[in-house]
Image: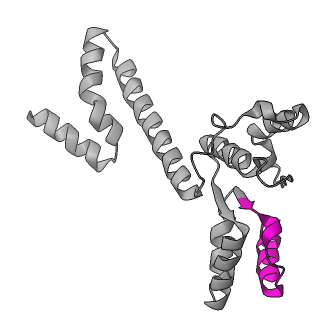
Amino acid sequence: MTALSTAMNDCLKELNLPTVRASYGEVCQQAVQESYSYEQFLLELLRLESEGRQQRRIERLLRESRLPLEKSLEAFDLARLPSKVRQQVTALRDGAFVERRENVLAFGKPGSGKTHLLCALCQELVHQGHRALYATCALLVQELLGAKRDLRLPQMLKRLARYDVLLIDDLGYVRQDREEMEVLFTLLAERY
């Protein structure tokens, strides 16, 4: 490695530009072969860094979301849905309801694909840059009750408020216990 390469590598490491660091040698060769201007060369490096950051952000948001990634739109047979529901799915994919802070409720028989479809829609929203969190109602209520018991409920509600989308699955299976309902309504009241 030349002194120039070492200095370049050190600067890119310091500036936290991992994609530029990994690809600048290849882009340099491409720039020479295709006679890039300085601006074209710089733009190509910055474009690669931007794409890399966006990809890493989406990967982080997907991990954080707790979504079952196997439940994607590609793995769901939309043809099995009535045409009216397919139209609603198409309308929901753009995520405008998130900006309007609207709730979406899905009703249907057990095994009809509600969870799969909603998880798939949430994945689409994450790819658009929205923060989402998936939890079953029972697990979420237990986490809220634990936070209340440990006097951390306000902190947990604040953490949950950072999400653009909360996908609460199996809402109908909550036990109707007064304390469970209280923490669930506290969460919902905080958000809306």
The secondary structure making up most of the magenta span is helix
Q: Which residue is more in the foreground, 164 or 170?
A: 170
Q: Which residue is outermost to the top? A: 34
Q: Is residue 61 left or right of 191 when viewed as pictured? A: left
Image coords of residue 89 (percent x, y):
80, 38
- Above or below 180: residue 103: above
Q: Residue at x 21, y 40 (%)?
A: 9
Q: Which residue is more in the foreground, 22 or 123?
A: 123
Q: For the C terminus, which image quadrant?
A: bottom right
Q: Which residues are magenta?
A: 167-192
- Above or below 160: residue 27: above
> What's the coloring here?
one colour
Q: Residue at x 67, y 82 (%)?
A: 153
- Above or below 154: residue 73: above
Q: Which residue is outermost to the right? A: 84
Q: How many marks?
A: 0
Image coords of residue 35 (percent x, y):
30, 9
Q: Which residue is more in the foreground, 3 or 24?
A: 24
Image coords of residue 98 (percent x, y):
77, 49
Q: Residue at x 41, y 31 (%)?
A: 48
Q: Which residue is more in the foreground, 52 or 132?
A: 132
Query: Residue 169: within the magenta?
Result: yes
Quadrant housing residue 5? top left
Quadrant housing residue 64? bottom right
Query: Residue 19: within the magenta?
Result: no
Quadrant housing residue 167? bottom right
Q: Residue at x 32, y 42 (%)?
A: 18
Image coords of residue 21 (percent x, y):
28, 37
Q: Is residue 119 left or right of 5 when viewed as pictured? A: right
Q: For the N terminus, which image quadrant?
A: top left
